[in-house]
Image (tube, rainbow, N blue to C red):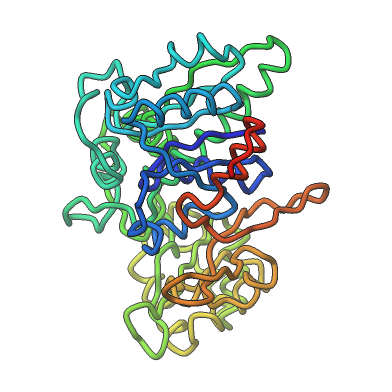
Amino acid sequence: MRVLDLTHQVAGPSATLALAFLGADVVKVVPPGDRSSYDATPFYLNNASKRSIAIDLKSEAGHDLALRLADAADVFVENFSPGVVDRLGLSYDVLRERNPRLVYAQIKGFASDSPYANFPSFDPLVQAVSGASSITGDPGGPPMKPGPDVGDTGTGMVAAVGILAALYQRTATGEGQHLELAMADHVATFLRIHYGWPVERDLDTPRFGNGPPFLETTAPSDIYPCPPFGPNDYVQIHCGNDKQWRRFADAIGRPELKDDPRFATMAGRGEHKAEIDAIVTEWTSTKDKVEAMVILGEAGVPAGAVRTTGEVLRDPDLRKRGIFVPVEHPVYGEVPIPAWPVRMSGSPVTVTPPPEPGRHRAEVLRDWLGEEVG
């Protein structure tokens, strides 16, 4: 599968990155002489396993080359600002006329038929507009942008799924199609369970801090401090049913809690959250976060240490299983980057370093167009 990649920033490159991990021949188009982005960390984290060709899309020769590459492509992906791809003469109508089998994917901040279609956008903005920020943060505090870039990378992953579906559809119809995905629309759909509040209670979903976004409060369901009590020395614990609560009581050496009528039901535990949180905190204050996670996890209680990005990146288990793989960076030397998390028995994923801008020009012209470059 050949993918012509005219993406930048995060949302677009994450879509083509997923396709590259799955074995597509992704050719990333970059402006001539653009070296600065290559050395930057974001480029490295979003462009592994691709090839690169430098094209001046505004020149006549560059435009002609882009058209010919699109003729040979299965997939075309772009996430320019609204209107840019049309001005470049690479719109869906233009390319479809030349290559009816082409799957043409566009990723934007807002949909083309949205009242905000021409507004500039980026991840925190669409998380705000789509409701994600309104449910993130402490009760009584201001809205807060969620940490993971679900607007950018999340949209890219969903775009990749749509592209694969369109390619599968093409096997039956023989024709490609036009895909449009707006970051704001994607994030809005990711809040699925949070719409229970307006649907069932006609209320806006509140902010829960580190608690669960359920209509019914329960406990324990929060983060709890652990020694040495640094800024990330916490463990998240959630007892989602009565059985898990009883397991928790045994795991912390407090079996008598199982017989306490105040805590016999989820509703009762929610009503007595303060008392339960005090009991939990007393226990977690004697265990480091990983120790607490292991004790509770082995007892069948959902618990997770609050790990930093550095701790996750250095995790030897994630390295061993290929969730992070080492590649050579021109500035930082060998660095680990996130790989493809789906483990596939019949088609293991290999990861190669992100391409130096334009380095595969001769290869791409030979492989895609049958042209030899002297």
| Quadrant where the image shows the C terminus | top right
Between 317 and 306, the residue placed more toward the observer is 317
Query: Can you say whether 106 is above or below 343 in the image?
Result: above
At 65% from the left and 24% from the top, the residue drawn is 167
Residue occupying the far front of the picture: 374
The picture quadrant where one finds residue 316 is: bottom right
Residue 238, horizontal then vertical, whole percent? 50, 62
Q: Nearer the viewer, residue 9 or 140?
A: 9
Residue pictured at 47% horizontal, 31% vertical:
77
Residue 367, image quadrant:
top right
Identity of the residue furthest to the right in this view: 346
* 32 vs 216, nearest the viewer: 32
Q: Relative to residue 262, is residue 106 depicted above or below?
A: above
Percent of width and height locating residue 296:
60, 74
Residue drawn 54% across the image and 41% down it: 27
Closest to the observer, 31 or 144: 31
**Vertical order, 234 against 62 (above or below):** below
Q: Quadrant of the N terminus?
A: top right
Q: Residue 55, percent across and down?
A: 41, 39
Q: Position of residue 287 (x, y in %)?
A: 49, 87
